Amino acid sequence: MKSEQSSLAADFAAHLSVDRGLSHNTTGAYVSDLRQYLQHLDSVGISDPGQATRDDVAGFLGALRSLGAAPETVARKLSMLRNLYRYLISQGRASRDPTELVSTPRKWRKLPEILTVAEVELVLSQPDLDTPKGIRDRAILELLYAAGLRVSELAGLALSALHLREGFVRCLGKGMKERVVPLGSHAVRWLTRYLEEARPLIVRPGTPDTIFLNMRGRALSRKGCWKIVQTYVSQAGLDKRVSPHTFRHSFATHLLEGGADLRVVQELLGHSDISTTQIYTHIDREYLLEVHRTYHPRG
C-alpha cells in the first residue's frame, strides 16, 4: 500500500475508534475493507478516494457481488464507505459523498448458498481415510475449496497440470483460457497422499491420465464429483443446498472477507473482467501464491 494510503488508513482507524467509539473488531474490519477498496481504486487508475464517483463505488460493490461475496459482507463494506466519505468530507479531503445514491445489498437477489469455514472443515472431515476412495474424495474436496475450480475444470485435470512441489495447478477454464491457481499446504498434502497411496490402487489397464478416477479406473465425471459432494454434505448433517460450485463461491467469499485484492480473486477464479469499468490485469504467480497463503483459511 502506498504511504499516503497507509496514512489514510491510520487516520481513519483513529477516527473510528476515538471519535466514533467503535469497537476494536469493527475498526479492524473497516480498515481491512478500506484497504481492499483502495486496491480496487488503484486497479482502475484512481489514487485518491476523494476523487471516486458513484460509478466507482458501484463498480467495487458489484465486483464483490459478482465474485460471490454475501449480501451481509457487501453491506458492511458499504457501511465502511459511508463512514469513510463522511470522514473525508469533514476533513476537506472530499467534496461529495459518492455513496449517497448507492442501493443497499438487501435489495439484491439472494446468492447461492455459501459454506462457513467451520462448515467446510466439517465436510472435509467426513471421508473414510482408511480406504482409497476416502483418500481420493478428501483430495477432491480439498482441491475444490483450495483452488475454487469449476467442477468441469477439476474433472478434466491431467496429471501434468499438477505442480505440487511449486504448490500450484494449471487449469483450462471457459474459452480454453489457462490460469495458474495456488493450492495451499493442505491441498498439496492430500493430493500427494492420493497420488502416492490411493490412485495406484484404482488404476486399470487403459486408465487415462486424468488426476481423478472413479473406482473402475475411468476418468471421474462431473456427475460423479457432484455425487461425492452430496454424500459428504449429507453425512455432515448440513441443511443447505450444496454443490461443487458452492465450494467455488465459498473459496472466493472467504478470500474477499479476509481482505484479498479483488484483482487477485478475479485471476484465481478465471473471470475475464471484474466489472465493466475494470481492465483485466495479469498477476504475477508468486504474488498469487503469497495472497493465497495469507488470506485463504487453508493456505
Image (cartoon, grey):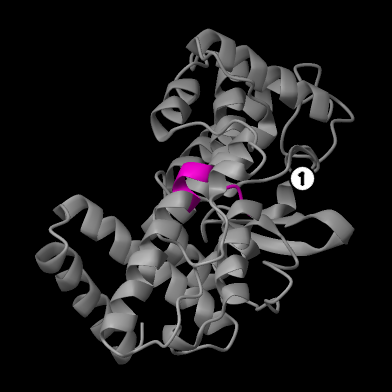
Task: Judge from the rendering whether residue 29 lies leftward or rightward of residue 218; answer left or right.
Answer: left
The part of the image, by quadrant, that contains residue 197 is top right
The part of the image, by quadrant, that contains residue 181 is bottom right
Taking the spot 63% from the left edge, 44% from the top edge, the residue there is 108
Q: Could one spot residue 281 in this view of the protein?
A: yes
Query: Alpha-carbon neighbours of circle 1 within 10 Å: few (<14), some, or many (≥20)?
Result: some
Q: In this view, does 295 lie above or below 222?
A: below
| Amino acid type, mark 1 | Glu
Task: Judge from the rendering whether residue 171 lies leftward or rightward of residue 135; answer left or right.
Answer: right
Check disc 1 and report its element: helix, strand or loop. Answer: helix
Quadrant of the snapshot with the N terminus: bottom left
Location of residue 227 in the rendering, given as x and y in whole percent from the top left corner = 72, 17
Taking the spot 81% from the left edge, 17% from the top edge, the residue there is 216
**Count of labels in the image:** 1
Q: Could one spot residue 251 in this view of the protein?
A: no
Which of the pair 277/132 is nearer the observer? 277
Q: What stretch is highlighted in magenta?
A: 67-74
Residue lying furthest left: 18
Location of residue 257 in the rendering, given as x and y in whole percent from the top left corner = 42, 51
The magenta stretch spans residue 40: no
Which of the pair 284/81 is nearer the observer? 81
Which residue does the numbered mark 1 point to in the structure image? 153
Taking the spot 72% from the left edge, 33% from the top edge, the residue there is 212
Which of the pair 126/32 is nearer the observer? 32
Location of residue 283 in the rendering, given as x and y in whole percent from the top left corner = 59, 75
The part of the image, by quadrant, that contains residue 106 is top right
Which of the pair 254/199 is nearer the observer? 254
Task: Judge from the rendering whether residue 167 lies leftward or rightward of residue 32; answer left or right.
Answer: right
Q: Is residue 185 above or below residue 279?
A: above
Taking the spot 77% from the left edge, 46% from the top edge, the residue there is 158
